[in-house]
Image (tube, grey):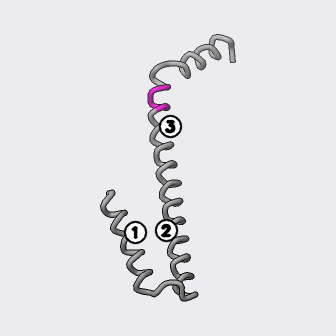
Amino acid sequence: MTDATNMSIIERLLSFEVWVPLLLTLGVVTTAVVKAVAGTMTSLARERTRREIAAWIAEGAMTPEQGERIMKAGAMDRHSSV
């Protein structure tokens, strides 16, 4: 490759037509990754809470009815914020 060809490639990469789609694509991918990570963290926290409530019920610190009310209250909070 000659120097003129190298400069042409560099000029194309630095052009507006390349950066706008690239930045838009990166924005969409970043948003998707952040949403996926946030959803996973929320799901893990919810499952941890369910296990803790089950342990409290198993050790007798809470009745099954109380555990059920707590879980339903959490479900109502999620639905009201949506």
Q: CA distance from mark 3 to mark 2?
A: 30 Å
Question: Which residue: 52% across, 82% down?
Answer: 54
Question: Which residue: 60% across, 18% down?
Answer: 10
Q: Secondary structure at mark 1?
A: helix
Residue 74 marker = 1
Q: Which residue is mark 2?
A: 46
Question: Where is residue 57 drawn, in percent x and y?
Answer: 52, 85
Q: Main secondary structure of the magenta part?
A: helix
Q: Earlier in the sequence, mark 1 or mark 3?
A: 3
Question: Which residue: 54% across, 19% down?
Answer: 14
Label 1–label 2 contact, CB within 8 A:
yes
**As drawn, 1 above or below 66:** above
Q: Earlier in the sequence, mark 1 or mark 2?
A: 2
Q: Secondary structure at mark 2?
A: helix
Judging depth in this view, the residue of 23 and 82 nearest the camera is: 82
Closest to the camera, between mark 1 and mark 3, is: 1
Residue 21 marker = none
Q: Which residue is mark 3?
A: 26
The three-letter amino acid code for the residue at tag 1 is Gly
The three-letter amino acid code for the residue at tag 3 is Leu
Neighbour class for label 1 at 10 Å: few (<14), some, many (≥20)?
few
Question: Which residue: 57% across, 82% down?
Answer: 55
Residue segment shown in magenta: 19-23
Neighbour class for label 3 at 10 Å: few (<14), some, many (≥20)?
few
